[in-house]
Structure formats: C-alpha cells, structure tokens
Amino acid sequence: MIEYDSANRPPAVIDEFIQLIHYRDLIFLMVGNILKNRYKRSVLGIFWMLLNPLLQTVVLTIAFGTMFKSSLPNYAVYLLSGLLAWNFITQTTQYAMGAMAYGGGLLKRIYIPRATYIVAAVGNGLINLLVSIGSLVIIILFLAHPITVAWLFLPVSILILTIFSLGLALLLSTASVFFTDTVDIYQVLVQALFFLTPIMYPASILPAELSQVLALNPFVILIEIFRIPIYTNHFPDFNLVISAISLALITLVAGWILFTSKADQLAYRL
Amino acid sequence: MNNIAIQLDNVTVRFRIPHEKIPTLQEYAIRWLKRRSVSFTDFNALDNISFSIKQGETVGIIGANGAGKSTLLKVISRVIRPTQGRVFLRGRIAPLLELGAGFDYEMTGRENIFLNGAVLGFSRKEMAARLDGIVEFSGIGNFIDAPIRTYSSGMVARLGFAVATDIQPEVLIIDEILSVGDADFQKKSAARILEYYNNGSTILVVSHNPNSIKQLCTYAIWLEHGIIKMMGSVDDVINNYSLSLV
C-alpha cells in the first residue's frame, strides 16, 4: 500500500525525480495534448510545423541572403540551422515559464509532480525541433548542400540543447513564480540576444573587441554545436563539445536544485 | 498503530501575507533598499493540529468559512506540505472535491479519461484496462468521443466521478452532499461510496452543515481559526457546534 509521510521522504532533489518517473504517462499525454490543441482547428494542421520554419527561412533569405553571399554560401542552411537551435531553447523556456506562471492552477488543486509542466514544455519543444529538422532537410536537398557523416553528431547536439533548455526552464520558471516580471525581463533579453548571437549573420562580421565579449554569450556555444555538423559538415572540435556539455549540465543541476528546493512553496505562491 | 489511515502531528500551515502586495521585482528592490526589509504578517491557516483517524472511520470536518477546512484537506492530499509537523497517510486518496482535475475541454471524453487518470497517478496501461468500466458507469454513452466542451456540466462531473472512483481508494474525501449529475446518477454514486465504506475505506466529509455530518459520520472535528475547537463523537461535537451558531 502507498504511504505518504511528509516528515520522512527522500530529499527533494531525488523525490521530485522519482515522482516524475511515476507520473511519466501524464507528461507524455500533456506533450501530445499541447500539439493536438495547437493544430486541432487549422486546415493544414501539423504541416505548419514544417511550413513555419520554411517560410521564415525564405523570407529572411530574401532579406539578408545577398548581404552574406560571399561569406556564407547556402545562406538558408546557415540561417535555419542556427534558428532551429535558437527557437528550441527560447520557445521551450518561454512556454515553460508561461505554463508555470499562468497555468499552474492544477498544482493548487491536486498533487502532481511540480516539474510536470516544465518537462512537458521541453518535450513539446523537442518534437517541434525534430519536425523542423525535416524542413531543414528539404532546404538542404533543394540547395544541394552536402549531408555528411558529421550528421551523426546531431543526436549529441540535440541532447545537449535539451539538457540546457530544461535547466534554464527550471531556473526561469522558479523565478517567474516568485517574480512575475521575470517573464517580461526574459522576453526583452531574448530579443536583444537574438541580434547579439550570430544566427542571421556570420560571426566574422563582428569587430574583434566585440567578438571577445560575444564568447561569453552561452547561446553561441549551443548554436555552434548544432550548426557545425549541418552547415560546415565536420564534427565540432573537442573543446567546444566539452564547454557545451559543461554548460548544459551546470545549468540543469543548478535549475534542478533551485526548483526542487522551492517546489513546496509553489502551491503557496501560485 | 497499524490501522491508522491518517495521522497529523502538530501540523502548522503558515501563509505569509505581505502587508502590501509587492508584485514586481522593481518594487521589491526599492523596498529592500529603503528599509532593508519587507513587512509580512504570518497567518496560520492551521495551527498545531494533531489527530489520527483509523481505517474505515467516517469523520466529519466542520467549521465556518475560513476555519481551515480546505487547507486541512490540501495538506492531507499533499497539495501543500505543512510548514511544521508531520502528515502521515496510508493508502491512495481520492479527493472528490476536485473532480475532473486537469480536464482539457478541447479533448474528447475518452482522451480525458486517460488525462484525468494520469493526473491521479495511474499509468496509461491501467487506464486502458479500466476504460470500458468508466465509460459505462459515467453513462456518457456515444458522447464519449466528442470533445467535453460539448458536454453539460453534469456530464463532466459524472465523468470525473467515474474516473476518480473506478477503483476503491483507501481514503475518500467528499463534500457535504455529493451532488453529481441527475437523480439517477446521485443514487448510483451514493451506492458506490456506500460500497467502498462497507469495504473499509476511510471517509472524510467536509461541511458547514451540521445535519449532513450527523447523518454520515461517527466522529467529527470542529475547526475554528485554524485550531481544533473540539473533536470526538459526532453527537457531542455537532451539538456544541450548533449551540455556538445560535
């Protein structure tokens, strides 16, 4: 028989994990429902997941493609591969935060693991990313850009991005419950960072002083780790991989510790 | 000791109420800089509550609005953890106050059975095995594959009840008069609760109506301002509670 003893349970860091495993089917259902609800009443339905990045790329390529013609051949591939990594991280975190700050009502009514919404948001983002890679392949084939053995590295890149996004989502969601402003502050930051990260333009156009500062932008590492195997067709170098993995793991550990230590207060605060 | 279903030892639930609401980081920072502190009032929704309930007992919880009834139920159903003290619970709890928690009105009845089941902690496999029984008990019939936004509120409640009570919980929490659906369904749901009671489920009844508690329960706990004003046999407690109302 199940027993619940509020005074005698595993440390929060472990307990939340055990509970998530127990409630895994809830997470899968939530991910499925986010997708279903989003496209339920649209004619093209799930195809929007493919079309959206395609259209975005076409528009941006028309606008900026000629500017970087010499430095970035097959600009559309460069752009979309960077954009996919960027969108995955930012959309996932923003969605998770919104789900916690505004949709956490269920957490006040009935017990479910507090991280459910956040993990579901990351799962949803991951599906979006995988489908969008389909659009990327369409563009690559269209431009006859090579697909090489370096693609084998992509699962590792995606794993790193997922770990980082989950960590960041946990950090920001916790913050957003205590201070609603976090949502708006993050939105402004994301907008600024988008232009400070070489996604639409090559890193080489930045002045030398600025590119040193840019090296501190964690998003650069994460985007590179995803874009290099696709665009440059070689495996990312060892140092880059190590820094990306460290960044992702540190973020997740920090996020998990912060979130689980505050999880009990969430029902009081939401 | 072995047949304890619910036990609370010195449970305190404290809500922290800022004197003025400080909704933004900016204001918080300004206050913090100015006075280096933000003033709060601590409010004990439950104040040092202790009791234990044996398996199979039917206990009424009575008290005025704001006495702490909802907080007590939340702390028992582990929605909130006590600020101090210990809550111990043996068995699965079915909080019938929260029927259909997590229902998604865009989804069909069938999809919602799985969703609601998952919210209650059941796996997909378990729910698949119990699907037919739930659909039948709910009496939703052909509407089961329609989105529940097309349901009447009674149908939604029936579906929620059918999911929550499909297998016998060790602890049931019910509202004073459990009125789900039409007269037929009320009979059906009452029969199911009675069956679980006869099979040994512990039942908590929350109410501010003394009569319904008197009918259903053998023991009663009277809450007032977060403390136990009185507890014991239902007659004693209810008599005193009724006198206090006059």
Image (cartoon, helix red, strand yellow):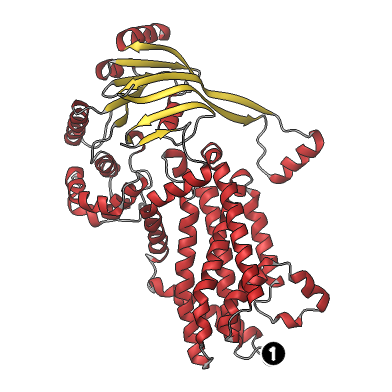
- Asked if one can make out residue A45 in the rendered structure from this viewpoint, the answer is yes
Report whether B142 appears left or right of B242: left
Rendering coords of residue A141 (x, y %): 48, 90
Q: Is residue B225 above or below residue B130?
A: above
Rendered image quadrant of residue A270: top right
Q: Is residue A2 above or below residue B41?
A: below
Return the residue nearer the eye: A167 or A242: A242
Report whether B181 appears left or right of A165: left
Return the residue nearer the eye: B7 or A106: B7
Q: Is residue B55 above or below residue A72?
A: above
Rendering coords of residue A152 (x, y %): 49, 80
Decide: few, some or many residues near mark 1? Use Cα within 10 Å; few <14, some 14-19, many ≥20: few
Return the residue nearer the eye: A262 or B117: A262
* Subunit that carries the residue with mark 1: A
- Asked if one can make out residue B208 in the rendered structure from this viewpoint, the answer is no
Q: Residue at x 44, y 68 (%)?
A: A127
- The mark tally for this picture is 1
Q: Residue at x 24, y 37 (%)?
A: B181
Rendered image quadrant of residue A50: bottom left
Q: Quadrant of the N terminus of chain A?
A: top left
Rendering coords of residue B157 (x, y %): 29, 41
Q: Is residue A114 above or below residue A42?
A: above
- Name the kind of residue labelled 1 in the image: Ser
Report whether B131 appears left or right of A153: left
Rendering coords of residue A117 (x, y %): 47, 52
Return the residue nearer the eye: B137 or A244: A244
Q: Residue at x 37, y 65 (%)?
A: A40
Q: Secondary structure at mark 1?
A: loop
According to the picture, the residue beneath numbered tag 1 turns out to be: A71
Rendered image quadrant of residue A60: bottom right
